[in-house]
Amino acid sequence: MLLVFAPAAPAVPSPIGEGKTELRLSGGLYKQLKRNGVDVLRSQAGKVRGRVATLPVEEGALDLLTGAGSVRYEGGIRFRTGDAQVALSGLTLDFTRRALRGKIAGRGLKLATARGVVNYRNGFGRDLIVKRLKLTGRAAKVLNAQLGLTRVFKGGRSLGETVGFADPESVTIQSGSILLEGSQGIFEKLKSLDVEVVPFEAATVLGTTPPAFSFPLLPGTVPMDLSDDGPGSETGLRLIQKGGTPELPIMSPVMSLVALSVSPESRTLSAGVSVHFSEGNPGLYGTTPIATLDLSASTLLTDPPSRTLSTINMRATINQFLAEKLNETFAQPKGKSPLFSAGEPLGTVSLNVQAQ
């Protein structure tokens, strides 16, 4: 038998949400600068104290599993002596090519090579350490010329080191679930209409009084605050109305609420909705909101050591569309007046994510 293995998907760098680094000039260089009357100052953002510049992340992207990628920082360092001054700005640590890049007096170039890179996972992001930055000959020549110095900056000499961290803007879902803890009232109404609520495919029942269900998440990415549209699940619920007699039951009709997705940003719970009767054409309504989410009592929980994110206690109420479909599908055929109305509690929804 011939086995064919598909190549692994290439890693996709994650945009950086926040972070900072400390650029620490080497002690030897700092003393040499002081002997030549050169002050070390901050340039725009960040701060400088002595020989240490603290710079916030401006942008960048890293493969959170391997550390490959680059990070650019706001601000920089400004060297000043007498009337001459020059800034190192647009500083970018490239962890793939092991280099520090930036601009000297507006000229872009490679400033230093990175040696002793220690780049490891810490919580959702990575700690980023470069033990030695070796100044390039070209950068040294430009710095000396701009400041009117002679061989204070030297190619191959240690510029310093960096110690920092970067946290992602979003994370990749390793596993997770949408949880629905149902409101007893709406499920009692369904029961009075001989409607059984059963999990679809990989969905599972967590409890019966009141009903509670878990729907596993699909792969994808989510922002750190879980605020964006999605994520979703292929699974959902089927509402099956029983008819006939105990000796000869008739299963009709069936409403499917599948491909559930939660959007805290737009305050909706959506599903792919379809209705099948024993006779006639099915009603296919596509993916549409079925409930409104109230986030006033919800809480975002983050646990960096375990890389888990959760938004809990989002209160869900059914919307006008779902109320009408429930009445048309289950109450009306039995000659019942409408039992369901918009704004009726569906239950509480939680979103749990285990990040890679």
Image (cartoon, grey):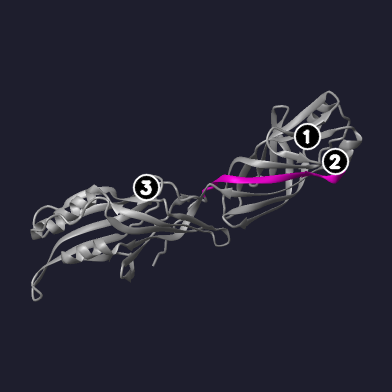
The residue that disc 2 covers is 30
Amino acid type at mark 2: Tyr
* x 74%, y 49%: residue: 115
| Contact? badges 2 and 3 (CB < 8 Å) | no
- Image height of 163 relative to 86, above or below: below
- Please report the bounds of the magenta region as a residue range: 12-29
Alpha carbon distance from label 3 to label 1: 47 Å
Looking at marks 3 and 1 on the same chain, the residue that comes earlier in the sequence is marked by: 1
Relative to residue 261, is residue 344 drawn left or right?
Answer: left
* x 85%, y 33%: residue: 38
Residue 41: mark in rendering:
1
Looking at marks 2 and 3 on the same chain, the residue that comes earlier in the sequence is marked by: 2
Quadrant of the rendered structure where residue 351 is? bottom left
The residue that disc 3 covers is 267
Q: What element carries label 2?
A: helix
Depth check: 278 or 188 in front? 188
Q: Is the magenta stretch mostly helix, strand or loop?
A: strand
| Mark 1 crowdedness (10 Å alpha carbons): few <14, some 14-19, many ≥20 | many
Relative to residue 340, is residue 2 drawn left or right?
Answer: right
Q: How many marks?
A: 3
Taking the magenta stretch, the answer to whether it contains residue 21 is yes
Name the quarter where the N terminus is drawn.
Answer: bottom left
Q: Is mark 3 on a helix, strand or loop?
A: loop
Taking the magenta stretch, the answer to whether it contains residue 46 is no
